[in-house]
Image: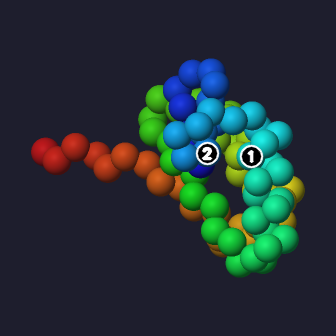
Amino acid sequence: MTVGTNSPYFYLGDQPVTLDRLQNEMTAATKKDPQVRVAIRADKWSPVGEVIKIWDAAKTANVAPDRVSMITEKPAAK
């Protein structure tokens, strides 16, 4: 899942989706595999509130907290 810098904020792969769709996808994935992992990709321009919405959706979908991770850009080499 990716959080964009402006609307639409949420992407599943390269397809824009609603928060409800992400919630439904995570719920279905958790039912199939309780050990499912969720990776949230965001950068410093992604709104923090939108990232938190995905984190909360994962919690609601019963994704274990230790199975949710953040992927960010690496800092530029100095």
Q: Determine whether, in the image, residue 61 is placed left or right of residue 33.
A: right
**Residue drawn at 76 percent across, 38 percent down:** 19
Image coords of residue 38 (percent x, y): 63, 61
Q: Which mark is residue 35?
A: none
Q: Secondary structure at mark 2?
A: strand
Dividing the picture into quadrants, the one containing residue 2 is top right
Looking at the rendered structure, the kind of residue marked 1 is Leu
Number of residue marks: 2
Q: Which mark is residue 22?
A: 1
Whichever of labels 1 and 2 marks the residue nearer the N terminus, that label is 2
C-alpha distance separating marks 1 and 2 = 7 Å
**Residue drawn at 28 percent across, 46 percent down:** 75
Q: Determine whether, in the image, residue 27 is placed left or right of residue 36.
A: right
Q: Which mark is residue 12?
A: 2
**Residue drawn at 57 percent across, 58 percent down:** 39
Q: Is residue 45 visible?
A: yes
Image coords of residue 44 (percent x, y): 45, 35
Vertical comparison of 32 with 75: above or below: below
**Residue drawn at 76 percent across, 65 percent down:** 29
Looking at the rendered structure, the kind of residue marked 2 is Leu
Q: Are discs 1 and 2 less than 8 Å apart at CB?
A: yes
